[in-house]
Amino acid sequence: MTQQILLIEDDQRLAEMVRDYLGESDFDVTIAATGTEGLALQRQRGFDAVLLDLMLPDTDGLEVCRTLRATDSVPILMLTAKGEPMDRIVGLEIGADDYLPKPFEPRELLARLRAILRRGKGEDRPDIMRFGTLEIDPQAMEARIGGKVCALTSHQFKLLEIMAGSAGRVLSRDYIMNALKGEDLGAFDRSIDVHISRIRAEIEEDPNRPRRLITVRGAGYVFARSQD
């Protein structure tokens, strides 16, 4: 069944490109050029998802998101022209389901749209990953050893989640940095190695002789499938 998408975007050329591209994947996209028009359309028609530009001519996209969330659980994907970390954080805190910095690849937009639609239906909930006494809980953004929460920053947790999600596979530093696209990469300016070391201090029995997060000399790192 064709899903109805509301795109609140004042850049007509971009809006038409998105409409045409998503139309090829069986989405019916309605365009609103202002936040006021978009809010009115959502109240009238109740779309399956909203693609919401941060910068609008009549109001702030964050305010539109806040207004929608006051009465509506529709999945919201924010489009952020500058990709400023604070804008992303505020957007997520007030109820956006995801964000996508401009310029973006249409395929990535499609993938993120499908993901928030699945989550809106209660699908695609990330399960807890278990490796012996280590638990990695994506929803809570927690890593636990024997039930005790590890002291990891959100960036370090994301790095651990990426490694664990590819357990048994050697990941290069370049691959890891690419997988972290969309994160505040400034948090990694002291190199992946430093953060790996800090993660080991929390999840390894002996950080100097790691059994979980292992260095593969000249290649990168591998998260061991079997550890305990």
Image (cartoon, grey):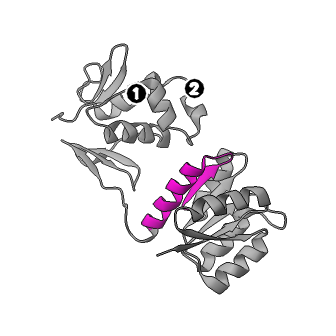
Q: Is residue 94 left or right of residue 213?
A: right
Q: Residue at x 72, y 81 (%)?
A: 40
Seen as rendered, the residue at the extreme right is 57
Q: Quadrant of the C terminus?
A: top left
Q: What residue would you read off at disc 2?
A: 189
Q: Is residue 217 above or below residue 84?
A: above
Contact, CB < 8 Å: mark 1 with mark 2? no
> Which x, y percent locates residue 214?
29, 24
Instruction: Kindly identify the amino acid type of the residue bearing the numbered disc 2.
Output: Asp
Q: Nearer the viewer, residue 151 or 102?
A: 102
Q: Is residue 75 visible?
A: yes
Q: Is residue 93 visible?
A: no
Question: Which of the 4 image quadrants contains residue 41?
Answer: bottom right
> Which x, y percent locates residue 45?
63, 84
Q: Is residue 125 left or right of residue 180?
A: left
Q: Is residue 4 magenta?
A: no
Q: Secondary structure at mark 1?
A: helix
| Residues rendered magenta in the picture | 97-119
Seen as rendered, the residue at the extreme left is 228
Q: Residue at x 72, y 63 (%)?
A: 61
Question: Which of the 4 image quadrants contains residue 69?
Answer: bottom right
N-terminal-most mark, 1 or 2: 2
> Which x, y percent locates residue 34?
79, 69
Q: Nearer the viewer, residue 166 or 66?
A: 166
Q: What residue would you read off at disc 1?
A: 196
Question: Which of the 4 image quadrants contains residue 74?
Answer: bottom right
Q: Is residue 149 above or below residue 173?
A: below
Main secondary structure type of the part rendered in magenta: helix
> Which x, y percent locates residue 85?
65, 45
Q: Nearer the viewer, residue 178 or 25?
A: 25
Label 1 Cα crowd, 10 Å radius (few <14 / some 14-19 / many 20+):
some
Q: Secondary structure at mark 2?
A: loop
